[in-house]
Amino acid sequence: MSFGRALNQSLRKLVAFLPRPARFAIYRSFVECNAQPDRRLVLKIAETQEELQACFRLLHDAYVSSGFMKPDPSGMRVTIYHALPTTTTLCAKYDGEVVGTLSLIRESLFGFPLQAIFDLSQVRALKGQIAEVSALAVHPKFRKTGGTILFPLMKFMYNYCTTFFDTRHLVIAVNPNRIEMYESLLFFQRLSEKSVDNYDFANGAPAVGAALDLKTAPALFKQVYASKTLRRNMHHYFVEAVMPNIVLPTRRYFTTNDPVMTPALLDYFFNQHTQVFAKLDDHKKQLLHAIYNLSAFQPVLPTLRKRVAQASERSHQRYSVQCPGVFKVMESARECTYQLLVVDLSLHGFQVYSQVPLPLGCWGEASIQLGKSEKSFSQAKAVLERANGSPGFYGFQLAEPDLAWRKFVSAMQAGTTHEDLDNASRFLPDSA
């Protein structure tokens, strides 16, 4: 063991004897957050084969060196969650080289990796979308540079989740000797008081689960950091500062996911270079087929021996969105207007959130902003209150989807990635 590493472990043991508030104050005293980092640093979604492979290799080496996995012949750490369109892998590139990565896993038919051992009922009770922060790794040459890569990657994650990913809650499963960093700096709250002794997703290493409510986080950041200098002010860094190094995706439509996996990429990472698809059980294979139900994917998906109808499969696929809208309806001989937020939609209906009660069973005009320059006008009526079991959510039925609505759904059906969606919508006809 090197002298530096031994000294670091000794200091960590000494700090562990201090009261919790004192420990947290020490952690915060080491914060160095620069909202204007070196221009050679670029933060973006990993979308090419080269970027994804670099992320998976960096992750593999970090997990192997920490004992979280055994070496894989591919030299990559790739899981079934990386294959899903609801997972987004972020990367930090310095001088064109991937030096940091993390993945955000939105809930899907596969759930979350950590839900197998941690109870998320308290998080779910607060409502809002959940994303698991997983697969975090930073290149060894940047691990001792005071968060030069880690903090910008975390800021990218925060900005992406709060503005693009429709996420309220972040959940994590981390090694017990790392949990206090997340608690002290970012205000994560533990999902349980005791660590789990054997976390299969990390080669049996112990783990602690924790969650962060992004709705309440800004107030906590401000309370603790507002009086500090900008270099140590995490509220300014996460909530107020604009980091020019971050490349957020451009979207024609107000969708909430940025899928990148094409059939070729799925085949490359999950069939040719790893055995991820081959090792799935029949149930998970069927779930994968339900998610990728386009003909272009069939040749690269694992073979199904027997298909069983799933209750979770819909006759009309729904797509996750965040589209503002207005519903106008006649009530007692006067026109009433309601502001809506459409959270998912299908060809013949949609689900909304409304801050005020909506009339049920009454036909009216729904005008929905599908994108910056895409708007739909259709007759609709609310047919179901508490559409997802939560107050404020309503299910709507469309009388007849208009052209803009049909173009959007057709583009979603034809496209497999974010780029495909834009391309497909450009070439759809402008008349019925």
Image (spheres, helix red, strand yellow):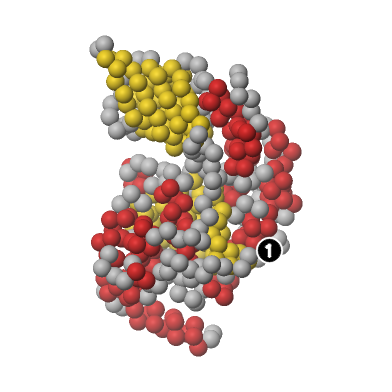
Residue 329: image location, x then y, percent: 33, 18
Q: Which residue is mark 1?
A: 75
Above or below, 76 relative to 20? above
Above or below, 428 relative to 1? above
Q: How many marks?
A: 1
Instruction: Let me know if residue 417 appears in the view.
Output: no
Instruction: Let me know if residue 144 appears in the view.
Output: yes
| Closest to the observer, 318 or 237 | 237
Quarter of the figure that contains the N terminus: bottom right
Above or below, 202 relative to 292? below
Residue that appears at 37% across and 75% down: 30
Left or right: residue 35 versus residue 309 is left
Residue that appears at 51% across and 52% down: 248
| Closest to the observer, 159 or 26 | 159
Hey, which quadrant is residue 291 in on the image?
A: top right
Name, please, the residue furthest toward the top.
Answer: 333
Q: Amino acid at mark 1?
A: Gly
Residue 13: image location, x then y, percent: 38, 80
Residue 153: image location, x then y, percent: 49, 62
Left or right: residue 414 versus residue 171 is right
